[in-house]
């Protein structure tokens, strides 16, 4: 039995209805565990990262730094999500979908705020100056992917729909990563408790709202071509930004930046394999293969993750309870 202060997560998988594999520990809702419709809302949270080291998963600097990249990548991306949804909301006449979209907007805005704080306080205090990478993210999300402000109303509507499908494709991966965060072995490997709580809280909300972006995009226009085009952009887009961020952090990490090119290559390769085997980092090949599920007939984002597990963690998260 877990104590009231123990979050449901990597060491306390949700209920007998969840299915968990030994390596990826992916889950899915079943008739026994599915709580039904969940009202989405932003949660006030507070995470004290002051005691977390840069390599917050002991003995796993590669996994630590790669996951930490999310603190740099996410804020601008999530503000871009919010902007697109706020643009689309006045055109949505389905009250239930509109309510879900407003809940999604609130959660994504809070995610951006929390990771902004991590950048400004935690990363800078550990000698990582993120300015260069953050400027790149601003340019991508505020300029390259900015809403179209020219052309006919039909052109601007088409641009909005394309952005909504790109968000839906990205959310496919955030749901997969959220499910990983809920079921990985960070705690068992002695990872910093506050950092684990922050990333698992974020992952749980990604699982909780995993269907919204897909439903919003499909509300405006759905076709296999739109899905394929969005996914063909999303996967390389995310991979490139994550790798750039990883190299950026490593260029300032004293445990890495003094190594030769060959030594770094070996560190990265060995570190990745060790992280996967320890259950603290997802297997990239499985994330890539999971892309195929996006195109299966009858695909539904709700097939990823377990809503009951996500909601149970969110109810017990120390960071959420601290701010309540």
Image (spheres, rainbow, N blue to C red):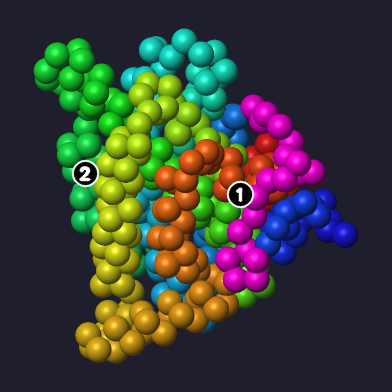
Q: Secondary structure at mark 1?
A: loop
Extreme residue in the left direction: 151
Mark 2 — residue? 140
On screen, residue 281 versus residue 138, left or right, reads right
Image: 193 above or below 41: below
Image: 219 above or below 306: above
Mark 1 — residue? 305
Which numbered circle lies on residue 66?
Answer: none
Q: Residue at x 42, y 45 (%)?
A: 295
Q: Quadrant of the C terminus?
A: top right
Q: Residue at x 29, y 89 (%)?
A: 263
Q: Residue at x 64, y 27 (%)?
A: 39
Q: Is 33 contained in the magenta span?
A: yes
**Number of residues whose C-alpha sits closer than 10 Å to that of mark 2, classed few (under 14), some (14–19) or many (20 or more):** some
Quarter where residue 267 is shown = bottom left
On screen, residue 189 versus residue 214, left or right, reads right
Q: Position of residue 303 (x, y in %)?
A: 59, 45
Q: Secondary structure at mark 2?
A: helix
Extreme residue in the right direction: 1
Magenta residues (range): 21-39
Q: Is 111 contained in the magenta span?
A: no
**Number of residues whose C-alpha sits closer than 10 Å to that of mark 1, classed few (under 14), some (14–19) or many (20 or more):** many
Q: Position of residue 9 (x, y in %)?
A: 68, 57
Give the number of callouts: 2
Quarter where residue 151 is shown = top left
Q: Are the residues tagged 1 and 2 within 8 Å (C-beta)?
A: no
How far apart marks 1 and 2 lie (CA) works out to 30 Å
Q: Residue at x 18, y 25 (%)?
A: 148
Residue 86 in sight? no
Q: Main secondary structure of the magenta part?
A: loop
């Amino acid at each position: 039995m877990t104590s009231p202060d123990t979050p449901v997560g990597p060491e306390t998988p949700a209920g007998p209805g969840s299915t968990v594999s030994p390596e990826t520990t992916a889950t899915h809702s079943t008739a026994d565990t599915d709580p039904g419709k969940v009202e989405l809302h932003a949660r006030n949270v507070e995470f004290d990262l002051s005691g977390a080291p840069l390599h917050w998963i002991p003995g796993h600097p590669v996994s630590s730094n790669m996951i930490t990249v999310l603190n740099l990548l996410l804020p601008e991306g999530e503000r871009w999500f919010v902007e697109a949804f706020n643009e689309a909301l006045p055109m949505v006449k389905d009250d239930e979908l509109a309510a879900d979209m407003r809940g999604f907007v609130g959660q994504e805005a809070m995610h951006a705020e929390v990771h902004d704080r991590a950048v400004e306080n935690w990363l800078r205090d550990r000698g990582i100056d993120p300015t260069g990478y953050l400027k790149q993210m601003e340019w991508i999300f505020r300029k390259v992917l900015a809403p179209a402000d020219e052309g006919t109303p039909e052109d601007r509507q088409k641009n909005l729909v394309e952005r909504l499908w790109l968000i839906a494709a990205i959310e496919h991966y955030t749901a997969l990563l959220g499910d990983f965060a809920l079921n990985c072995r960070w705690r068992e490997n002695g990872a910093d408790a506050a950092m684990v709580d922050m990333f698992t809280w974020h992952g749980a909300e990604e699982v909780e709202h995993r269907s919204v972006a897909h439903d919003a995009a499909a509300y405006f226009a759905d076709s296999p071509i739109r899905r394929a085009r969005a996914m063909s952009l999303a996967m390389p887009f995310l991979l490139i930004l994550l790798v750039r961020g990883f190299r950026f952090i490593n260029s300032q990490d004293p445990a890495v930046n003094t190594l030769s090119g060959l030594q770094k290559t070996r560190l990265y390769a060995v570190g990745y394999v060790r992280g996967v085997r320890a259950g603290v980092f997802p297997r990239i090949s499985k994330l890539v293969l999971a892309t195929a599920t996006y195109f299966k007939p009858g695909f539904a984002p709700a097939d990823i993750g377990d809503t009951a597990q996500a909601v149970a963690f969110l109810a017990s998260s120390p960071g959420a309870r601290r701010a309540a």
